[in-house]
Amino acid sequence: MNDLNFLGICGSLRSASRNMGLLRRAAASLPEGVRLTIADISELPFYAEDREKPESALRLIEQARIADALVLACPEYNYSMAPALKNALDWISREPGSLLAGKCAAILGAGGGMGTSRAQYHLRQTCVYLDLRVLNKPELFSNAFSASFAANGDVADNPEGEKLAANVRALMEELARTVRERKV
Ligand SMILES: Cc1cc2nc3c(=O)[nH]c(=O)nc-3n(C[C@H](O)[C@H](O)[C@H](O)COP(=O)(O)O)c2cc1C
């Protein structure tokens, strides 16, 4: 029986996204009792206050409502977080009742040489406003253009990929530990 429900959101909509590959790897290496659902935000329109909520937004909001924690895969676009990720958080944030307040979150990312660290620090700033409790450690900054990734975006089945997979697993373990501690 799963007692914890994580929601993964990926800021890249690319079909062979390595950031999505990180989320798939996270979903495949969860501690016992944890389930990770990956949100489909590919059809989510840009948020506008006077726009009726489309099905894609309603689904995302419900997934966020029932999630115990978020796992945010954060690509870096022009030194900041990708708009698709920010937009998903914007949709969730406009629901009455501060859906995300007090929930835990983990951030990971695949990008250029700095592993999306600049984007992740912008994302952390947004998470302050949302009152998400983001893990400080372990940090996960991975190089998207290394042997750690296969052409389809999956974490590669080689020594570099195994090292990255171990870091993803460690992050999921810490997230599960933190959520369970807070639930007691
Ligand atoms: C518009 C755009 C801007 C980018 N800017 C940066 C950047 O500032 N820093 C960086 O490390 N990578 C940058 N990249 C590279 C992305 O981080 C890289 O494409 C990454 O693999 C995207 O993740 P994905 O494989 O999940 O799509 C940029 C890519 C795009 C499309």
Image (cartoon, rainbow, N blue to C red):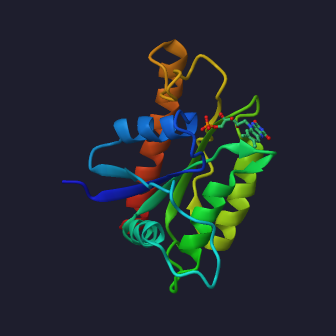
Left/right of residue 34 with respect to residue 172 in the rendered view = left
Residue found farthest to the right: 78
Q: Is residue 168 visible?
A: yes
Q: Residue at x 42, y 70 (%)?
A: 55
Q: Quadrant of residue 76?
A: top right
Left/right of residue 36 with respect to residue 126 in the rendered view = left
| Image quadrant, ligand 1 | top right
Left/right of residue 73 with respect to residue 81 in the rendered view = left
Q: Quadrant for the C terminus, please.
A: bottom left
Q: Quadrant for the N terminus, please.
A: bottom left
Q: What x and y, as percent, mark residue 107?
A: 58, 49
Q: What x and y, as percent, mark residue 119?
A: 74, 48
Q: What x and y, as percent, mark residue 14?
A: 57, 40
Relative to 89, residue 28 above or below: above
Q: Residue at x 42, y 38 (%)?
A: 24
Q: What x and y, as percent, mark residue 173?
A: 42, 43
Camera-nearest residue between 135 and 44: 44
Q: Is residue 29 visible?
A: no
Residue found farthest to the top: 159
Q: Residue at x 64, y 82 (%)?
A: 49
